[in-house]
């Protein structure tokens, strides 16, 4: 598979993805007659972040509805991964507010640990425990954080590993698996916590080309099943086929947001037009 093939990934079955609204699953009247979103799950308001003198997130306002799949794209250094990592406080912010399911993001301690159990994260580099088996990796969080008993955790882990297509690898260690298999284990580990939202930070960028589709197909299935997802990726085909909304970032700002059809066929900003001309035609 070439890089161009990766960018034009098309899953074998696109059926079943529901069309969700751009912000909120439903709109209801507020007490003063205004409209508020009933389904908002993740809300970022006026978020700013610096790394030294570099202003990596600039006045970010973003709302993600329950059940929505938001794909964040943009050139390298635009702030995509930093944005993703602020949602579960792997990166702190300098100003602004972030809330998950109506609650402000905790600063530290047990409340933050509970929040991270509700916000799954799939990293570029898998981050599996090398000294534990595949099964143990998926059981660990359930036992330590969710306080499940071992039998229930094992049952759930086996079910999820089957679901992502690596059920036969339970007793192996991560180093014995391919990169694609390891990333599917990482997705199963995130799902095992029964999260409200899963963040994917460039989940295929460390994979060999032939392993990319097997991971994207698992993510595509999660999207069809209604999982709330924030996906930072360079896979334009996935953005086209799985996203409800594309968020385009450049220079630390959200430049535009649109449905995939609108963004790829009729981008509004010159910055987005330039970006798409470089990645889709080369």
Image (cartoon, helix red, strand yellow):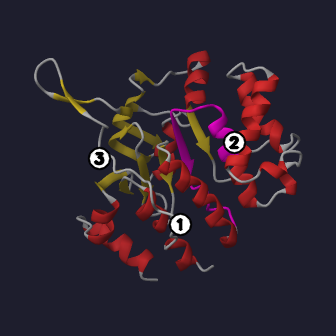
Percent of width and height locating residue 42? 40, 34
Q: Label 3, label 1: how many angstroms apart (C-alpha)?
A: 23 Å
Give me the disc on residue 22: 3
In this view, the mark in front (2 or 3): 2
Percent of width and height locating residue 263? 30, 64
Dot placed on the residue nearer the N-terminal end, 3 or 1: 1
Q: In this view, does 172 lie to the left or right of 43?
A: right
In this view, the mark in front (3 or 1): 1
Neighbour tally class for label 3: few under 14, some 14-19, many 20 plus, Cα within 10 Å:
some
Neighbour tally class for label 1: few under 14, some 14-19, many 20 plus, Cα within 10 Å:
some
Dot placed on the residue nearer the N-terminal end, 2 or 1: 1
Q: In this view, does 101 lie above or below 236?
A: above
Between 41 and 29, the one nearer to me in the picture: 29
Label 3 secondary element: loop
Label 2, on which residue?
160
Residue at left 64%, top 65%? Answer: 212
Residue 60: image quadrant is top left
Label 1, on which residue?
11
Q: What stretch is highlighted in magenta?
A: 186-207
Q: Is residue 276 left or right of residue 139?
A: left
């Amino acid at each position: 598979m070439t890089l161009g093939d990766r960018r034009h990934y098309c899953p074998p079955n696109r059926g079943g993805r529901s069309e969700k609204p751009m912000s909120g699953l439903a709109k209801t009247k507020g007490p003063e007659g205004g409209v508020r979103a009933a389904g908002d799950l993740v809300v970022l308001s006026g978020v700013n972040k610096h790394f030294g003198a570099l202003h990596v997130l600039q006045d970010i306002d973003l709302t993600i509805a329950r059940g929505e799949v938001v794909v964040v794209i943009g050139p390298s250094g635009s702030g995509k991964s930093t944005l993703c990592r602020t949602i579960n406080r792997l990166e702190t912010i300098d100003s602004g507010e972030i809330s998950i399911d109506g609650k402000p993001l905790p600063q530290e301690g047990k409340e933050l640990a509970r929040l991270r159990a509700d916000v799954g994260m799939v990293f570029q580099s898998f981050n599996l425990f090398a000294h534990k088996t595949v099964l143990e990796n998926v059981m660990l969080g359930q036992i330590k954080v969710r306080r499940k008993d071992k039998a229930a955790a094992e049952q759930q882990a086996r079910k999820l590993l089957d679901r992502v297509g690596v059920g036969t690898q339970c007793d192996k260690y991560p180093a014995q698996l391919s990169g694609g298999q390891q990333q599917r284990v990482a997705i199963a580990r995130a799902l095992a916590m029964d999260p409200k939202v899963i963040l994917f930070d460039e989940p295929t960028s460390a994979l060999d080309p032939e392993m990319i589709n097997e991971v994207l197909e698992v993510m595509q299935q999660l999207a069809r099943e209604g999982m709330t997802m924030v996906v930072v990726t360079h896979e334009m085909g996935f953005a086209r086929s799985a996203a409800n909304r594309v968020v385009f970032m450049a220079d630390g700002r959200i430049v535009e947001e649109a449905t995939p059809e609108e963004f790829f066929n009729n981008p509004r900003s010159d910055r987005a037009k330039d970006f798409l001309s470089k990645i889709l035609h080369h």
